[in-house]
Amino acid sequence: MSLNIKKIPVFVFPNSLKFYLGSKASHKQLLTLYNPYDFPVRFKVLSTAPNKYAVIDPEGSIGPRTLVDIVIRHTMPTIANCNFTDKFRISMQDHTTKQILGKREIDAILLQGERDDLSSDGDFHSVPFIERPSTSEDQRIFVTNRSLPVTHSTNYVIAIVIGLVCVVTLLLPTQQEVPHPSNIPTYLHVSVNFKLVLAYVLGLVSMVIFKP
């Protein structure tokens, strides 16, 4: 890496840390540092309120195109420390010279109450209620749960095709009906038992086709 590089973007997730007084699980959070570059870097984590936080491994190295997770624990979750915004600064340094290549600051705040990820909708708000219109034209837009008509045309076509196959096969000579030479090849002669099966199938198909 060239030593004349003065600044690079620092990639950190999340952009802010929110601790909740009533949720002990939120008192320990992960901060992920990304190194998308093709050279290793060193990192260092600083805080404007180091007496309120404990950072596991606040200094270290990140290999090329890798990431590291840093554990940040709030050590003083009291009501007196709520609603004060602290800051963390993450600096990236040259792995060899320790020259600062970039910095990134994120906010950290302790909030009262408990974290409820399921009920928190963030920036989403309720939309106004609109009554269902009474005109038939507008109802076609709102009513989307109506059932679709079922058609049996495909079944009829299949039944007709099967019936035609049965009829044509039944018209072929049986294997016993060979008293004189026939123009039909021998391999097309059908046994009596097979014709009986086809006649039975034809009867079932006829019931389907002509069913009222």
Image (cartoon, rainbow, N blue to C red):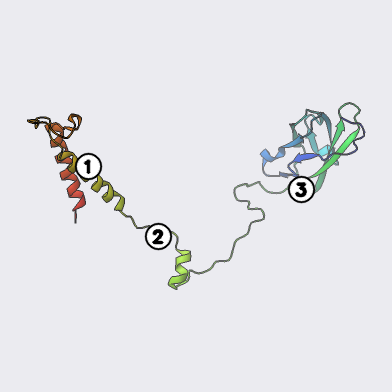
Is 28 positioned to the left or the right of 9 in the image? left
Q: Which residue is mark 3?
A: 82
Question: Tag 2, which secondary structure?
Answer: loop
Q: Residue at x 45, y 71 (%)?
A: 137
- Label 2 vs label 1: CA separation? 39 Å
Going by the numbered disc 2, the residue's amino acid type is: Arg
Furthest residue to the bottom? 135
Front: mark 2 or 3: 2
Furthest residue to the top? 96
Q: Compare marks 2 and 3 and give the one earlier in the sequence.
A: 3
Residue 11 percent across, percent down from the top left: 78, 39
Q: Compare marks 2 and 1 and give the one earlier in the sequence.
A: 2
Q: Which residue is mark 1?
A: 165
Q: Are marks 2 and 1 in contact (CB under 8 Å)?
A: no
Between 5 and 19, the one lying in front of the other is 5
Badge 3: few (under 14), some or many (20 or more) residues near its Cα, within 10 Å? some
> Quadrant where the N terminus lies?
top right
